[in-house]
Image: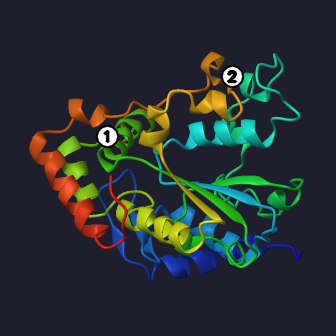
Amino acid sequence: MAEINNDAAEEGDGQLLSTLPKKEGMWKPFFLYRGCWLTPRTVTSITLLQSQFAPRPDDVVLATFPKCGTTWLKALAFAVANRSRHPAGSGAHPLLTTHPQDLVPSLEVPHRDVHPVAGLDKLPSPRLLSTHMPPSLLPPGISALGCRVVYLCREPKDVFVSSWHYMNRVSADFSPDMDATFELFCEGFSLYGPLWDHVRGYWEQSVAEPDRVLFLKYDDMMADAGVSDRIGGLPMENSSYFRAGKVGDWKTHLTEEMAKKLDCIVEEKLRGSGLTF
């Protein structure tokens, strides 16, 4: 592979960003890239992926909108994919000592301007990868080669509350007001948003290609208390790295008016798709 000229890449990225819609209101300005709100560095990372990533037919991509059970899905998928090498209940199971985020690498994170895409080429097949990208931003070839995709969605009100808590924890210089952030979320303004476009994109792919795209609901899977045991058995309960998101936590944070407003927006945005929450 030809050596990447970082200076030229940065100049090209700057030119691209200057052409994109920009909006303030989060911990840094977000840019609307092909219908998706992203941080500047995420735009750069995704454009590098689109031009440099080489999919393989046996790749499996775990896709989620942020704060929709990504860590849990990675742990579950890793345990299932590696159950012959690492049996459930094994005292040496990787999930007991290694964070699921490290066991299942992300396509666009860490940012590919610093961590070259070529690093993904060194992973042995079959690769288990993850992403927050909507289907419209996935690197070319993933669909054409028949790469399998597992998508996990979550009740939108819980997504908002979880996202708000997360921003409060990780952004030292950004203290989001819940009411203001909620209004932005309802406008579709959130990282990798709008949420409804993200969910609908993968839902429609799952309907069109059910053998390639598996669409799952976090709430349904968490309600099925024995799901983990039945499909491989996960040692996550003993892992200090695993934190399960609470289903219905929005009830302690959102007013009835806020809940109805978001419900109506999501219902309208998903109308005709056959998908409901």
Name the one closer to the observer, 229 or 19: 229
Q: Report which residue position mark 2 lands on.
A: 235
Q: Tell me the crowding category of disc 1: few under 14, some 14 to 19, or many 20 or more residues within 10 angstroms, Cα based.
A: many
Percent across and percent down for residue 200 are 42, 67
**Secondary structure of residue under mark 1:** helix
Which quadrant would residue 111 be assigned to in this image?
Answer: bottom right
Q: Is residue 10 above or below residue 251?
A: below
Q: Report which residue position mark 1 lands on.
A: 161
Percent across and percent down for residue 112 are 69, 61
Q: Residue at x 71, y 32 (%)?
A: 232
Precedes in sequence: disc 1 or disc 2: 1
The answer to whether residue 272 is left or right of residue 227 is left
- The amino acid pointed to by label 2 is Pro
The answer to whether residue 218 is left or right of residue 241 is left
Which quadrant would residue 229 be assigned to in this image?
Answer: top right
The quadrant of the picture occupied by the N terminus is: bottom right
Name the one closer to the observer, 266 or 48: 266
Q: Tell me the crowding category of disc 2: few under 14, some 14 to 19, or many 20 or more residues within 10 angstroms, Cα based.
A: many
Question: Going by the picture, which residue comes out furthest to the left?
Answer: 257
Which quadrant would residue 79 be assigned to in this image?
Answer: top right
- The amino acid pointed to by label 1 is Val
- In the rendered view, how is the structure colored? rainbow
Percent across and percent down for residue 139 are 67, 73
**Secondary structure of residue under mark 2:** helix
Q: CA distance from mark 1 to mark 2?
A: 27 Å
Q: Residue at x 88, y 56 (%)?
A: 125
Q: Is residue 216 above or below residue 24?
A: above
